[in-house]
Image: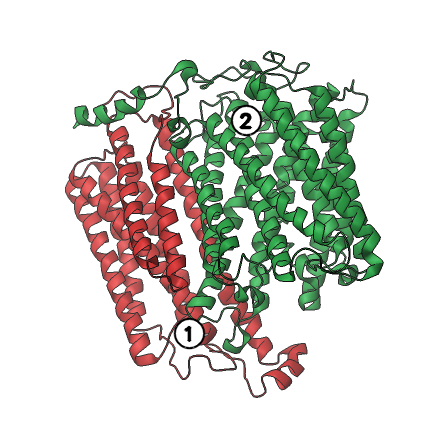
Chain colours: A red, B green
Amino acid sequence: MDHTDDKYYVPHGSHWPIVGSVAMFAMLGGLASYLNGGEFGGMMSLLGLAILITMMAGWFGNVIAESMAGYYNPQVDKSFRMGMMWFIFSEVMFFAAFFGALFYARQLAIPWLGGEGTKFMTNLTLWPGFEAMWPSNGPAHAGGEYESMAAAGLPAINTAILLTSSVTITIAHHALKDGNRLLLNLGVLLTVILGFTFISLQAAEYMHAYSELNLKLSTGIYGSTFFVLTGFHGMHVTVGAIFLTVIWFRVLSGHFTPQNHFAFEAASWYWHFVDVVWLCLYFFVYWL
Amino acid sequence: MGSEYEATADQHHADDHGHNGAPSGIKRWLFSTNHKDIGTMYLVFSLLMFFIGGMMIMIVRAELFQPGLQFVDPAFFNQMTTMHALVMVFGAVMPAFVGLANWMIPLMVGAPDMALPRMNNWSFWLLPVGFSFLLGTLFMPGGAPAAGWTMYPPLVMQTGDAFPYMVFAVHILGASSIMGAINIIVTIMNMRAPQMTLLKMPLFVWTWFITAFLLLAAMPVFAGAVTMLLFDQFFGAHFFNAAGGGDPVMFQHIFWFFGHPEVYIMILPAFGIVSEIIPTFARKPLFGYNSMVFATASIAFLSFIVWAHHMFTVGMPLAGELFFMFSTMLIAVPTGIKVCNWIATMWRGSMTFETPMLFSLAFVFLFTIGGFSGLMLAITPVDFQYHDTYFVVAHFHYVLVPGSVFAIMAAVYYWLPKWTGHMVDEKLGKIHFWLSAIFVNITFFPQHFLGLAGMPRRIPDYSTQFADFNMMSSIGAFGFGLSQLLFVYIVYQAVKGGEKADRQVWDNPIGLEWTVPSPAPHHTFETAPEVR
């Protein structure tokens, strides 16, 4: 298994990318059609998702096979690491757009609507009586009366869960480096369980918001930023948890060695990334 | 587990290698992991989009040939201006640069291929998906997007069935760009030949390296912006609706946080190309190499703190107007350094004027005109006069057409012998250059005057006092469009045959790409070359 050669491994021909393109065409084309009220859009979108999942399984399967066959020298490993790192950076920028929207709304849009500074006449003529405050669903009270989400309770528990999971994955990482397979196994398993617990609690929180607080995506700018930020974060946690689940099965199959475990580290970096995003969310969305 | 895995992995080794190491048939292109083949696909795709986007603007210029409405209704006119911009930006200019990066960066740094070859394939093959969405919108109820490529709400909310396709096209093209950028960064950081230190890299590699970071930081923000549009449109969110506490101006801020780096994404690689070509034909090393690198990095940094100069008239606090005015003017410093370096490179060089050099010289001269009009637009009180007039159109077309597009043309003329093994027909190349250079000025120079006189952009009809300059501009546009057919013929000719090119192609050019045979074999630098 260990015949690492000096040359940089360049794969020759792969059909998975083009399968991925077909998947994206069906998935997003279908979704667009569905949003326009098309009859078969939903079906097509799900079909696209299925193809995408097949593609990922096949593509990653290829990479795992090549990795296990020892085709990757340290330089290839470094390419993967850098690739993952910069991918996470682009994800950070994606969240930055939504955080930017939140800050802009809170610091500029709402105060201006409330007549701050030179905007006095705007307030008087367009939105008389509207007072700037946060949270807000705007001068038209979009979505009607609502209660904001408290920072204590479920969100606080979720913060604790995610922080703990960050610790467990780090313990697993150290165990992997020390060759302690039992602890590695347990560490990853625990992280996965904590991850899915977080997602379930998040779902419960959403239900609570919709059924009891009348806090919805349509609840003005507060509801929009709240659900889009926490929603995209939740999606990323889900992806991370699935990622870690795959890693757990690979741990069980003994794929990782103390020297060679890029996929494990990629998953753990990704996990730390969703963790940090959550901390920002907890601070700016729930707490402040 | 070893044997089973090795079997699958070995298959990959076995199922290629026809003659010249290139697999044959459609699979060569669909399944390609070869940087040269993928680069070729990018370039051909970009040429196709250049003509599609070009035809759209021919319709626009035909309508503007005379005042009054002659050929199309205003709604379709707006679709054409919007789609022209989207196709040219995301379909023609960006993919052309990525194609050049694919072809040249591994050759220039002495790498066997791009660092992540399979992902490289996907970056390309997402483009046809994105553009089938975008071009498909032309045939949908409500027509194609017509609110301008900037997609400002609330106007963009009136888009018909095209709306979600437009949003998803942006997502897909963004994903393609991000994967391309990651690949370029990793290739440059990890795949250089051992002695190729950072400050020995050719400038084309440097400028693309920096551009890739711009892509990585800007594209996700654009994805976020259009996602918010999608949520506002379909799921009742209120990001850009003041009644719900949002703000349509917020979209403009987020959009231009992407949009301004985006314009540098379309010009920095052009700087790199010109910095390769001018030294070759001036037969002198590039003047001020280090300052070129640092100037590029400075421009990249500044590009993230100047975005609101696109929105001076929208209503911003005075402090904002001042900050964005001064930070924008600062960009003139590193850009000026670059222009002076190109001129100093030519100073007392033994110059010859082959086609790539002609395009590069025109680039330096005409891009600088675009830079100066940009400086005028940067001045807030002056911009109140120019905003949304043809002056702006003239400005950004000067940096994009005789800027980016000329640099791409120069690059093709410069490296085509390396790609095909055949010299380009110099005579036809020069004719193509002069036709392009003359018509581009006939097209865009009068637009300065139109703008200064107050003609608004994105309008199908206009007051009669603008008639003469518009007719001139239209004639220039038709001439420019037709001249590009000659370009296709020249490229086709060089692909088919012609005078054989040797390794060096030109007179002692500097760079690793000139050490491999012409045409470059399917696989190059499988072992790292020596770098001096």
Q: Residue B410 appears in which quarter of the rendering?
A: top right
Q: Report whether mark 2 lies on the same chain as mark 1.
A: no
| Image position of A135 with respect to B484: above or below | below
Element at label 1: loop
| Image position of B183 with respect to B112: above or below | below
Say which amino acid is labelled 1.
Answer: Ser
Could you tell me how far apart the alpha carbons at marks 2 and 1 are, in whole angstroms? Answer: 49 Å
Identify which residue, B59 or B125, lies in the foreground: B59
Give the left or right position of residue B224, taking residue B311 as reference.
Answer: left
Chain designation of label 1: A
Q: Residue B443 appears in which quarter of the rendering?
A: top right
User: Residue at point 47% right, 38% down?
Assistant: B180
The numbered mark at residue B445 is none
Identify which residue, A154 or B488, lies in the foreground: B488
User: Residue at point 58% right, 33% down?
Assistant: B206
Chain designation of label 2: B
Give the left or right position of residue B7, taking residue B38 as reference.
Answer: left
Cβ–Cβ under 8 Å for marks 2 and 1: no
Label 1 crowd (10 A; few <14 / some 14-19 / many >=20):
many
Which residue is denoted by mark 1 in the rendering? A218
Say which amino acid is labelled 2.
Answer: Met
Residue B80 in percent (x, y) is at: 61, 53
Label 2 crowd (10 A; few <14 / some 14-19 / many >=20):
many
Which residue is denoted by mark 2 in the rendering? B104
Residue B146 seen in the figure: yes
Residue B453 seen in the figure: no
Picture quarter with the C terminus of chain A: bottom left
User: Residue at point 68% right, 14% down?
Assistant: B507
